[in-house]
Image (cartoon, grey):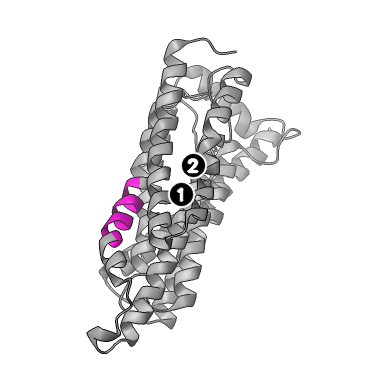
Amino acid sequence: MITSPKIILWSIISRILFTAHGALLVWVVVEMKNNQLYWILLIGLLLLSLEMVVTLAVTEKGEWKWFSPMVFLYLTAAIPSIFLLELDFLQYRIVMSNSTQTEHLPTDAAYFIIYNPWLLTLEQVMILVIVMGRWIMPKGEMDRIQLTELLLIYIGLGADILDILNLIKDPQVETCRMVNIVGLSIFSWALLQFTLVLTQTQSSDSTDNDEMSSSVKGTCGSSCCTNEVWSLLIAVGMQDGPFLIFRLYVMIKEQVLNEMMIFFICKNIFTVIIEIYRIFVIQCSKKSGKNE
């Protein structure tokens, strides 16, 4: 049982941060849908208190090593909320595109005009909330160097993830239901990687360097891959790979081509190539180490 006041304090603050942002998203859903039933999306946020008690009671440093239940519970409210709101705005854009006269506009058009800035702001703030939450929550097994590296990775991932939301609102595809649903699904899938802490890297001190050396060369009886390889595989499978395929489809099939599209496609191509190359190098080093 953790009794450190500092760890308990930061655990409470980080969960308050996630709860506040998630509750705002759910509130917007309830207002837009005009249906109180959608308050059910708060269940995950309400469980954060129980999760905190269990985490502090079971773990030694206030956080789980590989998986963050706190971020997962937050995303159980945030992802469905954004998905539902974006689908509503998709339907609104479709209706607007089919309306040639102002009197044919939907009666609830004012709601979309009012809440659209809310949604855009909450989507952008979400990445900042995840980064801030990861920063102030207990570090668990990570040291400060690993934490700062993880936060920098999160910021880079977040910029790429948010661009998918901008892409599905491009004038050429903003009313395409299939592109929007696939884009939102990929967006949701990519967000789930924030629940994993496999992106943590080895620290630079001598002890950690020894551990890294043994993990690369090591006796591979316990695992076929190092932590870094799993991190790279997750990055390829949960973000860079799906994002590259989706952007190429939108560019080729829907003929959406602009400077940002070209930049992110090139970025995804080079990232996937480098990640695969890195996996190859690590595995080759591991095999050569075993043969020595």
Quarter occupied by residue 137 = top left
Q: Residue 281: x percent and y percent?
A: 55, 46
Quarter occupied by residue 67 = top right
Residue 141 left/right relative to 247:
right
Tag 2 near tag 1, CB within 8 Å: yes
SS majority, magenta: helix
Nearer to us in this view, 243 or 90: 90
Q: Which residues are magenta?
A: 115-125
Q: Residue 270: x percent and y percent?
A: 41, 59
- Give me the residue at 51% from left, 62% from top: 185
- Give me the residue at 59% from left, 37% from top: 227
| Vertical arrangement, residue 242 with respect to residue 3, above or below | below
| Vertical arrangement, residue 145 with respect to residue 111, above or below | above
Q: Residue 82: x percent and y percent?
A: 43, 57
Residue with the mark numbered 2:
74
- Quadrant including the N terminus: top right
Q: Residue furthest bottom?
A: 100
Q: Residue furthest right?
A: 221
Residue 146 left/right relative to 283:
left
Residue with the mark numbered 1:
78
Nearer to us in this view, 277 or 166: 166
- Distance from label 2 to label 1 (Cα)? 6 Å
Residue 7 is marked as none
- Give me the residue at 33% from left, 68% from top: 261
Report if residue 156 is visible in the image. Answer: yes
- Quadrant including the C terminus: top right
Give neighbour class at mark 1: few <14, some 14-19, many 20+ (Cα, 10 Å): many
Give neighbour class at mark 2: few <14, some 14-19, many 20+ (Cα, 10 Å): many
